[in-house]
Amino acid sequence: MVKVLPETIKRLLTKPFTIQYPKRKPRIPENFRGRHIYHKELCIFCRLCEINCPNDAIKVDKEKKTWEVDLGRCIFCQVCQEVCPTKPKAVKLSKAYELADSEKKNFILRF
Ligand code: SF4
Ligand code: SF4
């Protein structure tokens, strides 16, 4: 008890390491990799994002001109953004991190 007392007092006088989320939002770093932003008008349906995705999270249909990503499979590696050849990029990872949902189907973003 005597041994831990100085540490306890020290911790009481210092700022907490945690924040009161969701009341307070964390500071998101510049290079954070969150939910995708997809611009259909820029996409050339080359399928490079789909082919290079390491977790088969992207489906591109060139005929139907559809693009989808399954956030439940995505590991947010950003490879899809890196290989996208358009300028500006048709797919980018954003800073959006609040992705929790109780329905599995809601993790699939269809465009
Ligand atoms: S971030 Fe990575 S895992 Fe997620 S869709 Fe893009 S390439 Fe696939
Ligand atoms: S790599 Fe870019 S341009 Fe090609 S299909 Fe994916 S999002 Fe579209």
Image (spheres, helix red, strand yellow):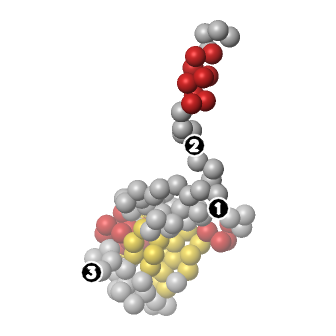
Please name whichever residue, 68 or 15, is drawn nearer the observer in this view of the structure.
15
Q: Are marks 2 and 3 in contact (CB under 8 Å)?
A: no
Where in the figure is residue 102, as x and y percent of width and height? Answer: 72, 64
Q: Do the residues labelled 1 and 3 touch (CB within 8 Å)?
A: no
The amino acid at mark 1 is Ala
Question: Closer to the N terminus: mark 2 or mark 3?
Answer: 2
Q: In the shown orientation, is residue 42 left or right of residue 103? A: left
Residue 77 visible in the snapshot: no
The image shows residue 19, relative to residue 65, as above or below, that is: above
Question: Closer to the N terminus: mark 1 or mark 3?
Answer: 3
The amino acid at mark 2 is Thr
Question: Closer to the N terminus: mark 1 or mark 2?
Answer: 2
Q: Do the residues labelled 1 and 2 touch (CB within 8 Å)?
A: no
Q: Which residue lies furthest to the front in this view?
A: 13
The residue depicted at 63 percent of the width and 50 percent of the height is: 20
Residue 18's mark? 2
Q: How far apart are marks 2 and 3 (CA)?
A: 39 Å
Element under disc 1: loop
Name the mark nearer the viewer: 1 or 2: 2
The image shows residue 38, relative to residue 81, as above or below, that is: below
The amino acid at mark 3 is Lys
Q: Name the residue under label 3.
A: 87
The residue carrying pointer 2 sits among few (fewer than 14), some (14 to 19) or many (20 or more) residues within 10 Å by Cα, namely few
Q: Name the residue under label 1.
A: 100
Q: Distance between the residues labelled 1 and 2?
A: 20 Å
